[in-house]
Amino acid sequence: MKTTLILPAYNEEEALPKTLEEYFDYADEIIIVNDGSKDNTDRLASEYASKFEKVKYIKHEVNRGKPEALRTGVKNSTGDILIFTDTDCTYPARYIPEAIKEIENGADMVLGARIFNDQNVPKLNRLGNRIFSMLITYFCYSMILDAQTGFRVMRKSIFPRLDVNARNLEYETKMTMRAAKLGYDVVEIPIEYRQRVGRSKLNPFKDGYNMLKSIPSIIWKESTLLLKSVLVVNAVLFSIGLLFGAFSLYQKLTIGVVTHEYYPLIAVIFILVAMQLMSFSLIMDFIVNKLNMIEKKIRK
Ligand SMILES: Nc1nc2c(ncn2[C@@H]2O[C@H](COP(=O)(O)OP(=O)(O)OP(=O)(O)O)[C@@H](O)[C@H]2O)c(=O)[nH]1
Ligand SMILES: [Mg+2]
Protein backbone atom coordinates (compact mmCIF):
# COMPACT_ATOMS: atom_id res chain seq x y z
CA MET A 1 0.00 0.00 0.00
CA LYS A 2 1.23 3.48 -0.88
CA THR A 3 1.95 5.82 2.01
CA THR A 4 1.62 9.60 2.10
CA LEU A 5 3.25 11.67 4.83
CA ILE A 6 1.70 15.05 5.51
CA LEU A 7 3.85 17.77 7.06
CA PRO A 8 1.94 20.86 8.19
CA ALA A 9 4.46 23.65 8.62
CA TYR A 10 3.96 27.06 10.13
CA ASN A 11 7.20 29.02 10.50
CA GLU A 12 9.28 25.86 10.77
CA GLU A 13 12.47 26.94 8.94
CA GLU A 14 14.61 25.36 11.65
CA ALA A 15 12.80 22.06 12.02
CA LEU A 16 11.59 21.40 8.44
CA PRO A 17 14.95 20.23 7.01
CA LYS A 18 15.60 17.94 9.98
CA THR A 19 12.08 16.49 9.93
CA LEU A 20 12.20 15.88 6.19
CA GLU A 21 15.59 14.19 6.39
CA GLU A 22 14.46 11.94 9.22
CA TYR A 23 11.17 10.94 7.57
CA PHE A 24 12.39 10.79 3.97
CA ASP A 25 12.79 7.02 3.65
CA TYR A 26 9.64 6.17 5.58
CA ALA A 27 7.01 7.34 3.07
CA ASP A 28 6.34 6.95 -0.65
CA GLU A 29 4.98 10.47 -0.96
CA ILE A 30 5.64 13.53 1.21
CA ILE A 31 3.40 16.59 1.14
CA ILE A 32 4.61 19.78 2.81
CA VAL A 33 1.80 22.21 3.52
CA ASN A 34 3.16 25.64 4.31
CA ASP A 35 0.48 27.33 6.35
CA GLY A 36 1.20 30.99 5.56
CA SER A 37 4.66 31.02 7.14
CA LYS A 38 6.53 34.30 7.32
CA ASP A 39 10.01 32.79 7.62
CA ASN A 40 12.11 30.73 5.19
CA THR A 41 9.77 27.72 5.18
CA ASP A 42 8.56 28.65 1.68
CA ARG A 43 12.02 28.74 0.16
CA LEU A 44 13.15 25.52 1.84
CA ALA A 45 9.99 23.60 0.92
CA SER A 46 10.19 24.73 -2.74
CA GLU A 47 13.80 23.58 -2.91
CA TYR A 48 12.96 20.14 -1.55
CA ALA A 49 10.03 19.77 -3.94
CA SER A 50 12.13 20.64 -6.98
CA LYS A 51 14.96 18.37 -5.88
CA PHE A 52 12.99 15.24 -4.96
CA GLU A 53 10.22 13.76 -7.01
CA LYS A 54 8.33 12.32 -4.08
CA VAL A 55 8.11 15.65 -2.26
CA LYS A 56 5.10 17.82 -3.11
CA TYR A 57 4.75 21.37 -1.89
CA ILE A 58 1.52 23.28 -1.31
CA LYS A 59 1.23 26.72 0.15
CA HIS A 60 -1.56 28.55 1.98
CA GLU A 61 -1.07 32.24 1.27
CA VAL A 62 -2.38 33.11 4.74
CA ASN A 63 -2.31 31.11 7.97
CA ARG A 64 -5.41 28.91 8.23
CA GLY A 65 -4.51 26.71 11.21
CA LYS A 66 -3.24 23.15 11.53
CA PRO A 67 -6.51 21.29 10.76
CA GLU A 68 -6.89 23.17 7.48
CA ALA A 69 -3.24 22.44 6.64
CA LEU A 70 -3.83 18.72 7.21
CA ARG A 71 -7.01 18.79 5.08
CA THR A 72 -5.10 20.43 2.21
CA GLY A 73 -2.47 17.71 2.51
CA VAL A 74 -5.04 14.91 2.40
CA LYS A 75 -6.85 16.46 -0.60
CA ASN A 76 -3.61 16.37 -2.57
CA SER A 77 -2.45 12.94 -1.44
CA THR A 78 -2.39 9.84 -3.61
CA GLY A 79 -1.49 7.23 -0.97
CA ASP A 80 -3.79 4.62 0.61
CA ILE A 81 -2.26 5.19 4.04
CA LEU A 82 -1.93 8.65 5.57
CA ILE A 83 0.80 9.54 8.05
CA PHE A 84 0.39 12.72 10.10
CA THR A 85 3.22 14.16 12.13
CA ASP A 86 4.36 17.60 13.33
CA THR A 87 7.14 19.38 11.45
CA ASP A 88 9.00 20.15 14.67
CA CYS A 89 11.18 17.05 15.26
CA THR A 90 9.13 15.97 18.28
CA TYR A 91 7.84 12.64 16.95
CA PRO A 92 10.54 10.15 15.86
CA ALA A 93 10.00 8.62 12.42
CA ARG A 94 11.21 5.19 13.49
CA TYR A 95 7.74 4.14 14.69
CA ILE A 96 6.21 4.29 11.22
CA PRO A 97 6.91 0.67 10.20
CA GLU A 98 5.28 -0.59 13.41
CA ALA A 99 2.26 1.64 12.84
CA ILE A 100 1.88 0.50 9.25
CA LYS A 101 2.11 -3.12 10.33
CA GLU A 102 -0.81 -2.47 12.71
CA ILE A 103 -2.83 -1.03 9.82
CA GLU A 104 -1.98 -4.04 7.65
CA ASN A 105 -3.13 -6.28 10.51
CA GLY A 106 -6.54 -4.61 10.50
CA ALA A 107 -6.28 -1.45 12.62
CA ASP A 108 -8.05 1.59 11.17
CA MET A 109 -6.06 4.26 12.97
CA VAL A 110 -2.79 4.04 14.88
CA LEU A 111 -1.85 6.69 17.44
CA GLY A 112 1.66 7.32 18.69
CA ALA A 113 1.02 7.60 22.42
CA ARG A 114 3.49 9.83 24.26
CA ILE A 115 3.40 7.81 27.45
CA PHE A 116 6.99 7.34 28.39
CA ASN A 117 9.10 10.43 29.08
CA ASP A 118 6.03 12.65 28.94
CA GLN A 119 8.00 15.54 30.48
CA ASN A 120 8.44 16.88 26.94
CA VAL A 121 4.68 16.92 26.41
CA PRO A 122 3.39 20.45 27.10
CA LYS A 123 1.60 20.70 30.50
CA LEU A 124 -1.55 21.78 28.73
CA ASN A 125 -1.50 18.60 26.65
CA ARG A 126 -0.92 16.45 29.73
CA LEU A 127 -3.91 17.96 31.52
CA GLY A 128 -5.97 17.68 28.34
CA ASN A 129 -5.04 14.03 27.95
CA ARG A 130 -6.32 13.19 31.44
CA ILE A 131 -9.65 14.91 30.80
CA PHE A 132 -10.09 13.57 27.27
CA SER A 133 -9.11 10.07 28.34
CA MET A 134 -11.99 10.06 30.82
CA LEU A 135 -14.42 11.47 28.27
CA ILE A 136 -13.41 8.91 25.66
CA THR A 137 -13.67 6.05 28.13
CA TYR A 138 -17.14 7.25 29.06
CA PHE A 139 -18.55 8.09 25.64
CA CYS A 140 -16.68 5.63 23.45
CA TYR A 141 -16.05 2.68 25.81
CA SER A 142 -12.42 2.50 24.83
CA MET A 143 -9.31 3.36 26.72
CA ILE A 144 -7.18 5.90 24.85
CA LEU A 145 -4.24 7.46 26.66
CA ASP A 146 -3.06 10.11 24.22
CA ALA A 147 -6.02 11.37 22.22
CA GLN A 148 -4.22 14.59 21.29
CA THR A 149 -1.14 13.10 19.70
CA GLY A 150 -0.06 14.57 16.39
CA PHE A 151 1.56 11.31 15.25
CA ARG A 152 -1.12 9.19 13.63
CA VAL A 153 -1.39 6.74 10.78
CA MET A 154 -4.69 5.80 9.17
CA ARG A 155 -6.34 4.39 6.10
CA LYS A 156 -7.18 7.25 3.77
CA SER A 157 -10.61 5.74 3.15
CA ILE A 158 -11.74 6.53 6.70
CA PHE A 159 -10.49 10.12 6.74
CA PRO A 160 -13.69 11.77 5.40
CA ARG A 161 -15.69 10.32 8.31
CA LEU A 162 -13.11 11.52 10.82
CA ASP A 163 -12.58 14.99 9.44
CA VAL A 164 -14.38 16.72 12.29
CA ASN A 165 -15.24 20.35 12.41
CA ALA A 166 -12.46 22.07 14.36
CA ARG A 167 -10.03 24.90 13.74
CA ASN A 168 -7.50 24.46 16.52
CA LEU A 169 -5.82 22.13 18.95
CA GLU A 170 -9.04 20.21 19.59
CA TYR A 171 -8.97 18.77 16.05
CA GLU A 172 -6.88 15.71 16.91
CA THR A 173 -8.87 14.94 20.06
CA LYS A 174 -12.20 15.22 18.29
CA MET A 175 -10.90 13.05 15.46
CA THR A 176 -9.82 10.36 17.94
CA MET A 177 -13.22 10.48 19.66
CA ARG A 178 -15.07 10.23 16.36
CA ALA A 179 -13.02 7.19 15.34
CA ALA A 180 -13.67 5.42 18.65
CA LYS A 181 -17.34 6.39 18.58
CA LEU A 182 -17.79 5.05 15.04
CA GLY A 183 -16.36 1.73 16.20
CA TYR A 184 -13.11 1.96 14.26
CA ASP A 185 -10.24 -0.05 15.59
CA VAL A 186 -7.95 2.56 17.19
CA VAL A 187 -4.59 1.17 18.29
CA GLU A 188 -2.04 3.03 20.40
CA ILE A 189 1.67 2.34 20.19
CA PRO A 190 3.94 3.87 22.85
CA ILE A 191 6.41 6.35 21.38
CA GLU A 192 9.17 8.65 22.51
CA TYR A 193 8.41 12.38 22.40
CA ARG A 194 11.34 14.77 21.97
CA GLN A 195 11.75 18.42 22.68
CA ARG A 196 10.72 20.51 19.71
CA VAL A 197 13.20 22.27 17.43
CA GLY A 198 12.28 25.93 16.82
CA ARG A 199 9.76 28.09 18.59
CA SER A 200 6.50 26.63 19.91
CA LYS A 201 3.32 28.08 18.49
CA LEU A 202 1.30 26.86 21.41
CA ASN A 203 -0.33 29.71 23.29
CA PRO A 204 -1.23 28.47 26.80
CA PHE A 205 -4.04 31.02 27.14
CA LYS A 206 -5.63 30.88 23.71
CA ASP A 207 -5.10 27.14 23.18
CA GLY A 208 -5.95 26.32 26.80
CA TYR A 209 -9.16 28.27 26.47
CA ASN A 210 -10.03 26.53 23.19
CA MET A 211 -9.34 23.15 24.72
CA LEU A 212 -11.53 23.85 27.75
CA LYS A 213 -14.22 25.33 25.52
CA SER A 214 -14.32 22.16 23.46
CA ILE A 215 -15.13 19.97 26.50
CA PRO A 216 -18.78 21.02 27.06
CA SER A 217 -19.41 20.93 23.32
CA ILE A 218 -17.96 17.41 23.08
CA ILE A 219 -20.05 16.25 26.05
CA TRP A 220 -23.22 17.77 24.60
CA LYS A 221 -22.61 16.41 21.11
CA GLU A 222 -21.84 12.86 22.26
CA SER A 223 -24.62 12.62 24.87
CA THR A 224 -27.75 10.58 24.27
CA LEU A 225 -31.16 12.28 24.43
CA LEU A 226 -31.69 10.78 27.89
CA LEU A 227 -28.45 12.20 29.18
CA LYS A 228 -29.13 15.58 27.57
CA SER A 229 -32.49 15.80 29.40
CA VAL A 230 -30.84 14.88 32.69
CA LEU A 231 -28.12 17.48 32.11
CA VAL A 232 -30.75 20.19 31.60
CA VAL A 233 -32.82 19.19 34.69
CA ASN A 234 -29.63 18.96 36.64
CA ALA A 235 -28.43 22.40 35.59
CA VAL A 236 -31.78 23.87 36.75
CA LEU A 237 -31.65 22.10 40.14
CA PHE A 238 -28.02 23.05 40.63
CA SER A 239 -28.66 26.70 39.75
CA ILE A 240 -31.60 26.91 42.21
CA GLY A 241 -29.37 25.44 44.94
CA LEU A 242 -26.58 27.87 44.12
CA LEU A 243 -28.99 30.82 44.12
CA PHE A 244 -30.33 30.00 47.59
CA GLY A 245 -26.80 29.38 48.87
CA ALA A 246 -25.44 32.62 47.39
CA PHE A 247 -28.33 34.64 48.81
CA SER A 248 -27.77 33.20 52.32
CA LEU A 249 -24.05 33.88 52.11
CA TYR A 250 -24.68 37.41 50.91
CA GLN A 251 -27.00 38.11 53.87
CA LYS A 252 -24.57 36.60 56.35
CA LEU A 253 -21.70 38.72 55.00
CA THR A 254 -23.62 42.00 54.71
CA ILE A 255 -26.13 42.08 57.59
CA GLY A 256 -24.62 39.35 59.76
CA VAL A 257 -27.69 37.09 59.89
CA VAL A 258 -29.62 34.84 57.54
CA THR A 259 -33.20 36.08 57.65
CA HIS A 260 -34.62 32.89 56.11
CA GLU A 261 -32.90 30.21 58.12
CA TYR A 262 -34.17 27.40 55.89
CA TYR A 263 -32.55 28.87 52.73
CA PRO A 264 -29.12 27.23 53.37
CA LEU A 265 -30.95 23.95 53.89
CA ILE A 266 -32.79 24.34 50.57
CA ALA A 267 -29.44 25.11 48.90
CA VAL A 268 -27.82 21.96 50.27
CA ILE A 269 -30.81 19.76 49.39
CA PHE A 270 -31.01 21.00 45.80
CA ILE A 271 -27.28 20.64 45.21
CA LEU A 272 -27.20 17.15 46.76
CA VAL A 273 -30.21 15.99 44.73
CA ALA A 274 -28.57 17.34 41.58
CA MET A 275 -25.35 15.48 42.34
CA GLN A 276 -27.14 12.23 43.16
CA LEU A 277 -29.27 12.45 40.03
CA MET A 278 -26.20 13.16 37.92
CA SER A 279 -24.18 10.22 39.20
CA PHE A 280 -27.12 7.84 38.97
CA SER A 281 -27.92 8.95 35.40
CA LEU A 282 -24.30 8.72 34.28
CA ILE A 283 -24.04 5.14 35.53
CA MET A 284 -27.39 4.16 33.97
CA ASP A 285 -26.57 5.88 30.68
CA PHE A 286 -23.17 4.20 30.50
CA ILE A 287 -24.64 0.73 31.18
CA VAL A 288 -27.51 1.15 28.71
CA ASN A 289 -25.20 2.37 25.96
CA LYS A 290 -22.66 -0.31 26.59
CA LEU A 291 -25.37 -2.99 26.44
CA ASN A 292 -26.68 -1.48 23.19
CA MET A 293 -23.22 -1.62 21.74
CA ILE A 294 -22.70 -5.24 22.79
CA GLU A 295 -26.09 -6.15 21.27
CA LYS A 296 -25.14 -4.43 18.02
CA LYS A 297 -21.83 -6.29 17.91
CA ILE A 298 -23.52 -9.65 18.58
CA ARG A 299 -26.08 -9.00 15.78
CA LYS A 300 -23.25 -8.21 13.37
N1 LIG B 1 0.31 25.96 16.18
C1 LIG B 1 0.12 25.91 14.86
N2 LIG B 1 0.73 24.94 14.18
C2 LIG B 1 0.53 24.89 12.86
C3 LIG B 1 -0.30 25.80 12.19
N3 LIG B 1 -0.33 25.47 10.91
C4 LIG B 1 0.47 24.41 10.79
N4 LIG B 1 1.02 24.05 11.98
C5 LIG B 1 1.97 22.94 12.23
O1 LIG B 1 1.37 21.98 13.09
C6 LIG B 1 2.35 21.34 13.91
C7 LIG B 1 1.98 21.45 15.38
O2 LIG B 1 2.21 22.71 15.90
P1 LIG B 1 3.12 22.98 17.17
O3 LIG B 1 3.42 24.43 17.23
O4 LIG B 1 4.25 22.03 17.18
O5 LIG B 1 2.12 22.69 18.36
P2 LIG B 1 2.16 21.52 19.38
O6 LIG B 1 2.75 20.31 18.76
O7 LIG B 1 0.78 21.40 19.90
O8 LIG B 1 3.07 22.07 20.58
P3 LIG B 1 4.67 22.20 20.73
O9 LIG B 1 5.32 21.17 19.88
O10 LIG B 1 4.94 22.05 22.16
O11 LIG B 1 5.01 23.57 20.25
C8 LIG B 1 3.66 21.98 13.56
O12 LIG B 1 4.27 21.18 12.60
C9 LIG B 1 3.25 23.33 12.97
O13 LIG B 1 4.20 23.86 12.12
C10 LIG B 1 -0.94 26.84 12.92
O14 LIG B 1 -1.67 27.67 12.41
N5 LIG B 1 -0.69 26.85 14.25
MG1 LIG C 1 4.69 20.10 18.27
Image (tube, rainbow, N blue to C red):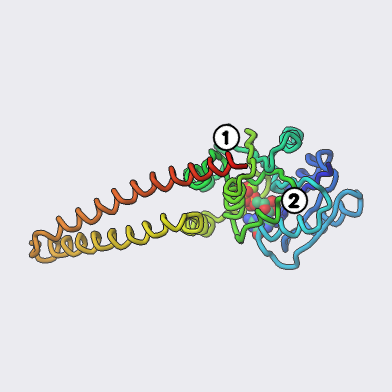
Amino acid beneath label 1: Ile
**Residue beneath the point at 63% across and 41% down:** 186
Left or right position of 292 against 179: left
Left or right position of 279 against 155: left
Amino acid beneath label 2: Ser
**Residue beneath the point at 60% across and 37% down:** 114
Q: Tell me the quarter of the picture where residue 117 sits.
A: top right
Lower sequence index among marks 1 and 2: 1
Rate crowding at label 1 as few (under 14), some (14 to 19) or many (20 or more) other CA atoms within 10 Å. Answer: some
Q: Position of residue 21 (x, y in %)?
A: 81, 42
**Residue beneath the point at 18% across and 64% down:** 247
In this view, the residue in front, 126 or 295, is: 295
**Residue beneath the point at 58% across and 32% down:** 116
Q: Mark on residue 157?
A: 2
Rate crowding at label 2 as few (under 14), some (14 to 19) or many (20 or more) other CA atoms within 10 Å. Answer: few
Residue 116 against residue 171 in the figure, above or below = above
Circle 2: element type:
helix
Is residue 284 among the parts visible in the rendering?
Answer: yes
Quarter of the picture holding the C terminus? top right
Q: Position of residue 97 (x, y in %)?
A: 76, 34
In this view, the residue in front, 204 or 73, is: 73
Count of marks, rendered view: 2
In this view, the residue in front, 78 or 252, is: 78
Q: CA gap, disc 1 to disc 2?
A: 28 Å
